[in-house]
Amino acid sequence: MRIFITGATGFAGSHLVESLLRQGHEIYALTHLATSHQALPKHPNLHGIDGDLLALDSLKTAVQQAQPDVVYHLAGQAYPGRSWQNPALTIAINTGGTANLLEAVIAFGRPNVVVVSSAEIYGYVSEDDLPLTEDTWPRPRHPYGVSKCAAGQLTAVYAKRYDLPVVEARPFNHVGPRQALGFVVPDFASQLAAIKLGQQPPIMSVGNLDAKRDFTDVRDVIQAYQILAEKGTPGASYLICSGQAVSIHTLLNILIETANISVEVTPDPDRMRPSDIPCLFGSHAKLTRDTEWTPKIHLRQSLQDAFQDWLIRLAPHK
C-alpha cells in the first residue's frame, strides 16, 4: 500500500515507519525543515515530501504526490507544558494543522485516515471518572489539551460531512526507546544512564513520584494505529492504553533496578506540578471489541529498552 505519514521522525512516528517498512509498504513522509529533528532513515520505500501543516496548498500537493491508500497524522506540538508559552501557535498547529490535512485528504480522495489525538483532552478528572472511556467528558487543563480535543472532534465532523473513513486515536502515555526528554521515562532513564556511564554524580532530581498514570509501550501503540486504519469505525474515537495505573515511583524503582546502580533521589521543586492529577488510567475495551487489539509488551521491558536506548545515546563515540 501507499501510505502518507506526518510526524514520521517523531517518537511514535519513527516506530510506525519502521513497522510499515518491514511490511513492504511504500511510505511518503511529510517533512518540514523547522521541526524534523532527525533525518528519515534511508530506505528505497521511504520518500520525504516537503510540506507544512499550516500551508494548505503545500499539503494538498504533498497528498496528491503520495496518492495514499492510508494516512497517519501524528505531527504536532507535543508538549503540554510548552503550550502555555504560545497557546495560539499550539492550537494553530494541532487543530488548524489537522483541519488542513483533512482538507488536503478530501481534495485527493477517500483514503483511510488515523488522526492521533491524546488522552490529555480529559484534563481534570475525579476517581469517579475512572477508568476513562471514549464517552468521558473532556475537561482540558491546558491549551495543548484544548487543541487535541478540537482536532479529535474534527475527525467526527469530516467523517459525517464527507463520508471520510477517518478515526481518532487517543493514546495515553506511551514509552520505550527514542523518546525525547521532557517526559518522565526519558528524563529518568537519561539521568540513570549518565550516572551508569560516570558522566554525573549518583544523584537524581525528580518531581512528584506519587502520581499514577497509564503507560503503554510505543510499539503496541503504533500497532493499534495500524489496526485502526483497517478496522476502525469511521468517525469513532478510540482510547489506546494499558488499562492500569502505575505510580511514577514504581517506574523509577524499575529503572534503578534495571541500571543496577545506587542513587540518591532528591525532590526538585522545578519538576513538581501542583496541578498533577493523582491517578489517571483508561479502558481499551472499545478498541479491543472493534479490532481485537490488546497491549502485549510488559512495562518492565519497555523501561529496560528505554534505559538501553539512553546508554547508547550517551556512550562516548570512538
Image (spheres, helix red, strand yellow):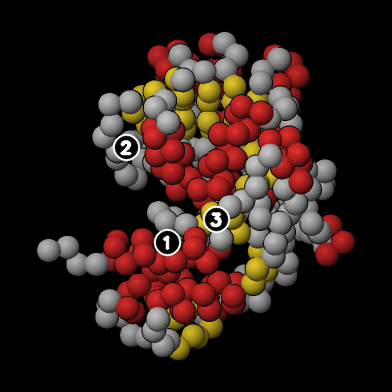
Q: Nearer the viewer, residue 286 or 152?
A: 286
Q: Taking 119 as reference, is 1 left or right?
A: left
Disc on the earlier residue, 3 or 2: 2
Residue at 64% across, 72% down:
247
Most extreme residue toward the right, as rendered? 128
Identity of the amino acid at label 2? Leu
Secondary structure under the numbered disc 1 in the rendered image: helix
Q: Is residue 142 visible?
A: no
Within the image, what quadrant is residue 154 found in? top right
Residue with the mark numbered 1: 305
Q: Label 2, secondary structure: give it.
A: loop
| Camera-side residue of 84 and 1 | 1
Residue to which mark 2 is pinned: 40
Q: Closest to the observer: 78 or 54?
A: 78
How much space separates mark 3 and mark 2, taking CA atoms? 26 Å
Three-letter amino acid code at the position of disc 3: Ile
Looking at the image, is 286 positioned above or below residue 4? below
The C terminus sits in image quarter: bottom left
Query: For mark 3, what is the residue?
Result: 297
Which residue lies at the image location 82% right of the left edge and 43% below the top edge? Answer: 135
